Amino acid sequence: MWHSFFSMHRIASRSGLLGRRCYSYAMKGGTSIAGVGDIIAVASGKGGVGKSTTAVNIAVALAKEFKLQVGLLDADIYGPSIPTMMNLHAKPEVNEDMKMIPVENHGVRCMSIGFLVDNDAPIVWRGPMIQCCCFIFTIDVHLSSSMLVILLFYWYQVMSALEKMTRGVAWGDLDILVVDMPPGTGDAQLSMSQRLRLSGALIVSTPQDIALIDARRGANMFRKVQVPILGLVENMSCFKCPKCGEKSYIFGEGGAQRTAEEMDMKLLGDVPLEISIRTGSDEGSPIVISSPNSASAQAYVNVAEKVTQRLNELAEERRMGPEILL
């Protein structure tokens, strides 16, 4: 293992990456995963906006309604929730190639770091493990050899975890892999965006300004690494009283639409706040399965359909190539 650290140090030194600005050692555009068609990131600028719930329901909708081969990667290394939401608690088996076999439910193949730890065990990433790439690759500093080795050690651990969750898994043939990203715009998010060949990113936010500000940051991060934005999903858009039917816009109204227009993004849908979303998630039965006729379930299905349409549009744009003006 130490050989790998010193090898990275020598490579970085020879290529002049140390002590100057650089954002990734991976090839521009990232690399693909064998057998996987499109890879989409479901992301949010902050936690608590329903990102994981959106990722789960879109993945299940793609499999259930559109009959696609779908994988779901829980890349939220801080708080993996896919095992609970998908009612999966078995540890993944390993095949003859020493790759983990995804655990499947609701027609979706899933992988999560949550499968590898006990439910109550804290998942602690020390600060340097997340921040060392910022020191090495985004700040103009000159480091001593000993400090560099320590930072590379932490960086190697984080990247190894992410690598195992992507290419260390026998995904098989997938039409689409949905990646539930960690919340925020830190190094783990940036690394995932650069190391995977993402077809696009879906930004999730709630209607209030404080969440939309961070949603803007998330969208800008993906644009900086040239990942297309599939669109914006407004979660918890309103609450409809189950007794009188009156709608209450608890977190504000119209903010996501304005943000989408200002950021030149498409608003793919707004998902109302319903109790059945919470109960379904807690019980491991996503709302598109447990209450398929509900407004929220229909909203998720509509978003999933627009995601497929947007992916087809992007594929056609890549096939046609850039327009040449003479």
Image (cartoon, rainbow, N blue to C red):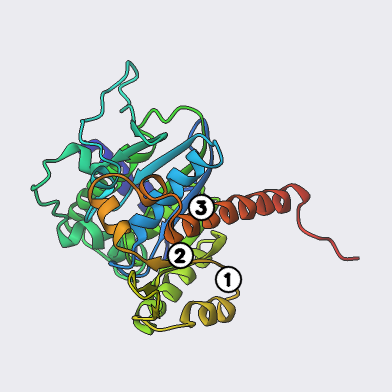
Question: Taking the image as drawn, is residue 20 in sight?
Answer: no
**Where in the figure is residue 25, as x and y percent of width and height?**
42, 51
Residue that appears at 62% across and 55% down: 310
Reading the image, the residue beneath label 2 is 203
- Kind of residue at badge 1: Met
- CB under 8 Å between discs 1 and 2: yes
Q: Could you give the CA–CA distance between mark 1 and mark 2, rounded to whole angstroms?
A: 10 Å
Q: Position of residue 21 (x, y in %)?
A: 41, 67
- Viewer-proximal residue among 51 and 275: 275
Residue located farthest toward the front when viewing the structure as drawn? 244
Q: Which residue is mark 1?
A: 265
Q: Earlier in the sequence, mark 1 or mark 2?
A: 2
Element class at badge 1: loop
- In front: mark 2 or mark 3? 3
Between the residue at mark 1 and the residue at mark 3, the CA separation in whole angstroms equals 19 Å
Question: What residue is shown at x 33% (from left), y 72% (from top)?
Answer: 243
Q: Tell me the distance, in whole angstroms, between the alpha carbons under discs 2 and 3.
A: 16 Å
Q: Position of residue 324 (x, y in %)?
A: 84, 61
Given contact means CB atoms under 8 Å apart, are the residues at marks 2 and 3 in contact?
no
Residue 190 visible (yes or no) = yes
The crowd level at tag 2 (other Cα within 10 Å; few <14, some 14-19, many 20+) is many
